[in-house]
Image (spheres, grey):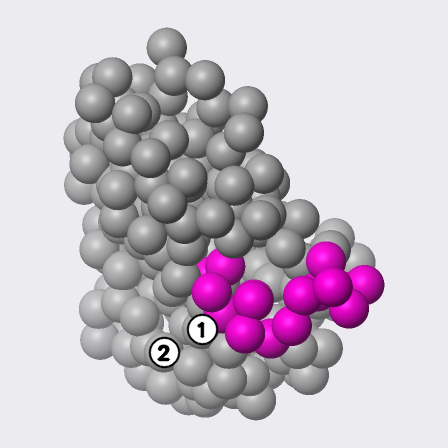
Amino acid sequence: MVDLTTLAESVGELEEEEMLDSLKKVMEDGGGQAAEAMAECQKGLDIVGERFETGEYFISDLVFAGELMSEAVKVLKPALAGETGTNMGKMILCTVEGDLHDIGKNIVRGMLEAGGFEVIDLGIDTPAEKVVETAKENNIKIVALSGVLTIAIGGMRRTIALLKESGLDVKVIIGGAPVNEAVKEEVGADAWAYNPQDTVRICQTWATA
């Protein structure tokens, strides 16, 4: 068993070498602690967010933290994918119209792919019409909408409304900094997620229902 007690701190301190060293040890040990290691990395990302809010960290630190998380997903992905070994089908992922952030979305994409999904990533600032068009073309049953800015709530609301108007039978999950249970109810989503692990778990539940 690999000692993961310092992993969250490594990410929180933006110590790339220490983080990668721990993750490589997890993989060398057979990858059985991959999900636990990913959860610790998420805790570290939370530390970075808190330090940004207090002014200790800056935008550049947030960007670097996102890059660290992408690296973590890359290292752990073989073990995370091995946990399912199942093809979960296609789904859509995007940052909604009005929001240009993609760090969180890219991390979630890596986790979803590791979880067995074929992710159609529509990128950032995605119009509702593009989501609906892509869903129709690919017989999509699950859509994940991401946003970092408060303005993203409006984009989520418009996208979900258009999906419902189109008559598509899809489940929608939302995530990002401004999202909580109240926002989920406000925009009409089926679920919301605090972190990538929850996103994957919920989407897998839908895919296998």
Residue 65 colored in magenta in the image: yes
Residue at 72 percent across and 58 percent down: it is 51
- The residue that label 2 is drawn on is 123
Nearest the eye: 186 or 25: 25
Q: Position of residue 203 (x, y in %)?
A: 42, 45
The secondary element bearing badge 1 is classed as loop
For the residues labelled 1 and 2, the Cα–Cα distance comes to 7 Å
The secondary element bearing badge 2 is classed as loop
Q: Position of residue 88 (x, y in %)?
A: 25, 43
Q: Which residues are magenta?
A: 51-66
Instruction: Answer whether labels 1 and 2 touch (C-beta < 8 Å).
Output: yes
Answer above or below: position of 109 versus 150: above
Q: Earlier in the sequence, mark 1 or mark 2?
A: 1
Q: Amino acid at mark 2?
A: Gly
Label 1, residues with CA under 10 Å away: few <14, some 14-19, many ≥20: some
Select label 1 or label 2 by which is in front: 1
Residue at 36 percent across and 78 percent down: it is 123
Residue at 50 percent across and 84 percent down: it is 100
Quadrant location of the N terminus? top left
Residue 116, picture quadrant: top left
Answer above or below: position of 194 versus 176: above
Q: Amino acid at mark 1?
A: Asp
> Could you tell me if residue 71 is visible in this image?
yes
Q: Main secondary structure of the magenta part?
A: helix
Residue 176 colored in magenta in the image: no
Label 2, residues with CA under 10 Å away: few <14, some 14-19, many ≥20: some
- The residue that label 1 is drawn on is 102
Residue at 36 percent across and 56 percent down: it is 70
